[in-house]
Amino acid sequence: MTNTVPKILIVGGGYAGFYTAWKLEKLLRKGEAEVTIVDPLPYMTYQPFLPEVAAGSIEARHSVVALRRHLKKTTVVAAKVTGINHAGKSATISPIVGDPYEFEYDQIVVTAGAVSRTFPIPGIADNAIGLKTIEEAVAIRDRLMSNFDKASVLPAGPERDRLLTVVVVGGGFAGIEVFAELRSLASSLVKSYPQITFDDTHFHLVEAMGRIMPEVSLKTSEWVLKNLAQRGASVHLDTQLTGAVDGNVELSTGETIPTDLIIWTAGVMANPTVVRGGDLPVEERGRIRTRADLRVGTAEEFVEGAWAAGDVSAVPDLSGGGVGGYCVPNAQHAVRQAKLLAKNITAVLRGEQPREYFHKNLGAVAGLGVGVGVFQSGKIALKGPIAWLAHRGYHGLAMPSWERKIRVVWGWVNNFFLGRDMVNLETVQSPRYVFEEFAARPRAAAPASPAIDPKSVAGEKAPVAGEKAAVGS
């Protein structure tokens, strides 16, 4: 490299990417390295809050962290990395506006995260929505509230039932949390719609396995099932989704559930754009092969100048609690890996040895609607309001930056005293509809009269005596 200052390229501005850059800013000395982070979105989304955003318990903007506000020494590029040529130490950057270009680097950090993993089930790609982005969470909330508005002016019947039916696919933490939070939201909305009763709303969760929430004990998961049943929600275990054409959810049991809101939470996969567009080693599940010290490679050898962390990477779980020997894709691991990754990069730049990542899972905590939650750490299990407070306390503290912590907690306090915000902004997805409806437009030009040739008029002869005029006789 002609530049004497090492260039560090971070691919992805999610948990791992943001925290790596944030920590590097604190560790690196002035002029020790130049850090660039590339992501098409200018913010990091705190994904554990997505179910509460979908339920209207947290303001959408409060659950994201602006990269430019908090990364003062890092160059933020609004773009995608569509190719990695690590052999040549360059990456192809495709900006949101303009032509792709090559970016040369000394160290690359791949933290591109994960996307929803779906199966080729008829109708899913056209009718379902995931829960990996803040935009999806907002759309889910607005769709449910819009459906309440529509249902309130319809007579009882199939169309009304369809609008008031929600189907969630996937019984992991994300699926159960959004399912329970939306059940809580619907129960709250019913109070403001005298035309709709609690029994008019229908909630179904579909899970292919024989249990939900494998992260907690069987006893705790059974308590969750019982709690959901008491709240009028149906969970279909050992059941697969076989179709969703035109919103008609078909189950392997033969049952068909018409719905206007299908939420897919049945798995994630490493960001394929980054993984497939580079020359870094990939393991059988499509993740970047990563060592315990977070360098790309195997235990025997590593790829010089390449690092990975978070959901896009396959990091060995040295605590022995991982699935298949690897760290599970969650925020707890992503944040801690990122902090160590920044320390390890700094150490390597200074000629020191990196340390291996070791973190024993602290447990699992989930919010299941206002006042209801579960917490599991080893054999210790908490349920109900105390677990709900633990959920909010843990994630409130885990939210990066005091600025964001205060906004989130202040929102919770407001909701406690003022109630849940019920404003539906679905029309923000087509903000010009009112303007277009009433905007004045130029009148269409009047059609021109056919031109008359003066010569043809002058050349006509008047009929003379004894000559019949041709008038149709």
Image: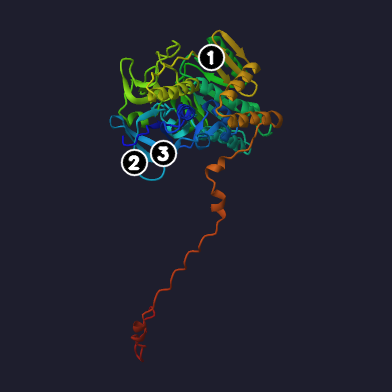
Q: Give coordinates of residue 32: x percent, y percent.
A: 41, 31
Q: Residues within 10 Å of mark 3 (few under 14, many from 20)?
A: many
The structure residue drawn at horizontal position 62% and vertical position 30%, both measured from the top left corner, is 406
Report which residue position mark 1 lands on.
Answer: 363
Mark whose residue sits in front, 3 or 1: 3
Dividing the picture into quadrants, the one containing residue 48 is: top right
Q: Residues within 10 Å of mark 2 (few under 14, many from 20)?
A: few
Q: Residue furthest top?
A: 379
Cα distance in 3D space between marks 2 and 3 = 11 Å
Q: Give coordinates of residue 73: x percent, y percent.
A: 47, 35
In this rendered view, identify the residue nearer to me: 54 or 396: 396
Q: Give coordinates of residue 221: x percent, y percent.
A: 55, 13
Query: Circle 1 — which element?
Result: loop
Q: Residue furthest left?
A: 87
Dividing the picture into quadrants, the one containing residue 152 is: top right
Q: Is residue 344 visible?
A: yes
Three-letter residue code for mark 2: Tyr
Q: Mark 3–mark 1 contact, CB under 8 Å?
A: no
In this rendered view, identify the residue nearer to me: 448 or 296: 296
Cα distance in 3D space between marks 3 and 1 = 36 Å
Dividing the picture into quadrants, the one containing residue 357 is: top left
Query: Circle 3 — which element?
Result: strand
Q: Earlier in the sequence, mark 2 or mark 3?
A: 3
In this rendered view, identify the residue nearer to me: 335 or 165: 335
Label of residue 70 in the image:
none
Q: Is residue 123 visible?
A: no
